[in-house]
Amino acid sequence: MCGRAALVQTVIPRGPQHVRDRRPGAGNDAVEGGFEGGFEGRFEGRVEVETMTGMTGTGTVGDVSFDFSDATVLVTGATSGIGRALAAAFDRAGATVHSTGTRPTADDYDAAVIGTYHRCRAQEPTEVDGLAASLDRLDVLVNNAGANLPGGRDEHDPDVFAESVQINLVATHRLSERCRALLADSGRPGGGAVVNLASMASFLAVPMVPGYAAAKAGVVGLTRTLAAAWAPSGIRVNAVAPGLIDTPMTEPMRTFTDLADPMVERTPMARWGTPEDVVGAVLFLSSSAAGFITGQTLCVDGGYSIA
């Protein structure tokens, strides 16, 4: 399963790269049948999050400081990879963080879960509804959870296709709608913010995963539509589309150099991205610095999409 899902990132042709031997936090916290990577070791309770590459000091990403000390933030799929890096960054910036995963409890993860943990499987509407109902305040919603090839099955099968769309698009819409009233009540400068995680598959053909690709293309359309519909309520809706990001989810790609190397070759910046590369874009779009930005999808791909 790991090898197959990792291939999804590689089916988009062309691109070189010198692959670095490093291991960041992890890939998206997947639903059942997907991936749940993480850091080695188990920690008890809420701990000080380790400094990550490109992040130094509280609320700082690169040389930019963010202050979310008055914000409540929900990050879905936040137990590993990009999602965990996002939860850590918001936590460092002072936010009250809520993290979701697919396992029953936070203790079921090797790495400490950041903030308050909620079990929420994207293919279970009642869990999505329950998550929203459990919150009494929300300023930023990051729809990060997702998976491809659910259960290791072929997305060309109509039933699997439908499940992938449910996981990657329908659940994103459902949670956003359920959180709308809370986001509209946000008193933060710039208003409430939603940041969706799109993909290069939103724009380019990925033959192996028609359901995932269709869903991620839908995320871009949903982002624009909700941005227009919710602007009168003071809610901004944007998306980030990561390129080739170095996480446990993509780690198996390293053994498929015929697929991975061409992707790096195509990338003008000639390297893999890291979860921290995505963090800066998401925190920016969630902040008042992006107060006049809505309906946009920002590619964080080292130039892959324009090469």
Image (cartoon, rainbow, N blue to C red):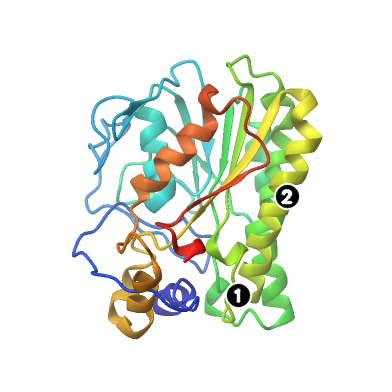
Residue farthest along the left direction in this orientation: 21
Instruction: State the residue at coordinates (77%, 44%).
Output: 225
Q: Is residue 191 above or below residue 236?
A: above
From the viewer's side, name the closer residue of 256 and 292: 292
Instruction: State the residue at coordinates (69%, 74%).
Output: 161
Element assignment for label 2: helix
Q: Which residue is labeled 2 in the image?
A: 222
Q: Which residue is labeled 1 in the image?
A: 205
Q: Is residue 7 left or right of residue 59?
A: right
Q: Amino acid at mark 1?
A: Ala
Q: Is residue 249 left or right of residue 100?
A: left
Query: At which x and y percent is residue 155?
Result: 63, 78
Res. 80 in view: no
Query: At which x and y percent is residue 115?
Result: 42, 32
Rounded to the nearest whole Å, what is the CA distance between mark 1 and mark 2?
19 Å
Q: Is residue 4 left or right of residue 65?
A: right
